[in-house]
Amino acid sequence: MNIALITGANRGLGFEIAQSLGRRGMHIILGVRDADKGRAALDTLGEQNITAECVSIDVSNSASIHAAAKTVAEQHQHLDVLVNNAGLLNDFGVTASALPLADLRASFETNFFGAFETTQAFLPLIRKSQAGRIVNMTSDLGSLTAMGDPEHMQYDAFAAGYQASKCALNVLTRQFAKELGDTAIKVNSASPGLCRTDMGGENAPLSVEEGAATAIWLATLDADGPTGCFFSSTLEGGEHPW
């Protein structure tokens, strides 16, 4: 049975990805910070006959990441899918000149350093998979092309910390994909677009299911699927400009 770990998995996009992969027969590991919310999510998965467990992980805390990797390695021989979903948006609408440095650091701690360290920590287990898949949950707002194109729908957005951290996360996708290019492991960036989650708001144009679809596709790629690429649910899973 394939095993998938999703960080930030007890609600929203993370939980939708977990449900969908579970319905495809994967054993799900919910990466959560809050044990009570994790147990509630497990109950919901159990009602769908999805096999699942929780692991405590705070991706902004190195000790927590490595403790989680140790726990998973003690219980499983391999990891087939890692979805770096945990994320932080704390500066939407804030211009760069007004952005507190503490908020910028917080964005990078979760969105970039957290995904980086989590990938490093779990990579030994992913290497033991017959076909590992790493999906970095990025954002349309992390596109340098969109930031510089006045005609692009994302051009007017101000969220310097979030955007910079997601742009940097896309660099990690390219770097890990290049490093692992001679293996069966594929690494890609997935943007959910603006969907109806706590982060996106109830008036967002995409449903949670639509937003999660691109990540689910990338987590279940065939052997001839892409690696080192950036896809977006806004484009119905199409490739997004970097």
Image: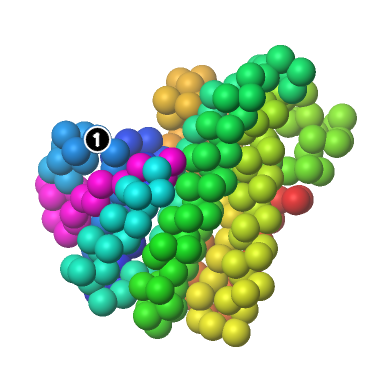
**What span is colored magenta in the figure?**
45-60
Left or right side of 69 for 132? right
The spot of residue 97 in percent (x, y) is 76, 18
Residue located 26% across and 77% down the image: 77
Check the image and report above or below for 71 versus 130. above
Can you give x and y, in whole percent of width and height, for residue 100 in the image? Answer: 63, 19
Q: Quadrant of the N terminus?
A: bottom left
Q: In this view, does 241 lie above or below 70?
A: above
The structure residue drawn at horizontal position 59% and vertical position 55%, both measured from the top left corner, is: 189
Quarter where residue 178 is shown: bottom right
How many marks do you count on the picture?
Answer: 1
Residue at 65% in and 53% down: 170
Outermost front residue: 63
Decide if residue 182 is on the left or right side of residue 133: right
Amino acid carrying label 1: it is Asp
The x, y position of residue 194, in whole percent, is: 56, 32
Q: Is residue 110 magenta?
A: no
Q: How crowded is mark 1: few (under 14 residues within 10 Å), some or many (20 or more)?
A: some
Residue at mark 1: 34
Asked whether the viewer can see residue 203, the reply is yes
Q: Is residue 221 above or below residue 7?
A: below
- Is 205 displayed left or right of 99 in the figure? left
Q: From where the camera sits, is residue 215 visible?
A: no
- Classify mark 1: helix, strand or loop: loop
Residue appearing at x 87%, y 30% in the figure: 150
